[in-house]
């Protein structure tokens, strides 16, 4: 959890370096952000990390609107935030799924141990 906060902080700090961005660089950032948010959606972040996903999606929408207005510096800034947010949402979704799977496996192990303790009958 702490590592993700550090990653998010570092990425947001870098976003200040997006000054004087040209169209091509902004469009590249936007494409990467779109990919990250779509990846988060595929990772089921809507279910497992909804606030992170919503924030990433909102930043992506803001980047797309800035692109429509040809505000390239804003596109790059919002897109970078969307990309980082999407990556964070994906990571948290994967973490939640892994924790759920671990819990299920632990329940199965506990059930098997209980069955062995009672002589193996179900």
Image: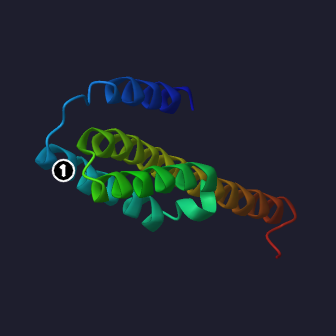
Does residue 63 sit above or below 118 in this rendering?
above
Q: Residue at x 14, y 41 (%)?
A: 22
Across and down, in percent, residue 43 comes to 46, 62
> In the drawing, does residue 59 fall left or right of residue 22?
right
Quadrant of the rendered image containing residue 115: bottom right
Is residue 23 visible in the rendered structure shown here?
yes
Does residue 17 sit above or below 91 in this rendering?
above
Q: Residue at x 62, y 56 (%)?
A: 50
Across and down, in percent, residue 89 comes to 50, 50
Residue ID for mark 1: 28
Quadrant of the rendered image containing residue 108: bottom right
> In the drawing, does residue 14 fall left or right of residue 59?
left
Across and down, in percent, residue 45 comes to 54, 59
In this rendered view, identify the residue nearer to me: 80 or 87: 80
The crowd level at tag 1 (other Cα within 10 Å; few <14, some 14-19, many 20+) is: some
| Secondary structure at numbered mark 1 | helix
Q: Residue at x 57, y 32 (%)?
A: 1
Is residue 36 visible in the rendered structure shown here?
no
> In the drawing, does residue 66 fall left or right of residue 2?
left
How many marks can you see?
A: 1
Q: Residue at x 62, y 51 (%)?
A: 51
Across and down, in percent, residue 49 comes to 60, 53
Of all residues, the one furthest to the right in this rendering is 118
Of all residues, the one furthest to the bottom in this rendering is 122
């Amino acid at each position: 959890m702490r590592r993700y906060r550090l990653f998010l902080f570092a990425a947001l700090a870098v976003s200040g370096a997006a000054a004087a961005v040209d169209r091509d660089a902004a469009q590249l950032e936007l494409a990467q952000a779109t990919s990250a948010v779509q990846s988060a959606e595929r990772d089921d972040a809507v279910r497992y990390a909804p606030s992170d996903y919503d924030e990433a999606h909102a930043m992506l929408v803001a980047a797309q609107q800035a692109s429509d207005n040809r505000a390239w510096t804003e596109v790059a800034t919002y897109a970078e935030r969307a990309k980082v947010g999407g990556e964070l949402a994906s990571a948290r979704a994967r973490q939640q799924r892994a924790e759920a799977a671990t819990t299920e496996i632990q329940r199965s192990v506990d059930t098997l141990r209980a069955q062995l303790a009672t002589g193996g009958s179900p």
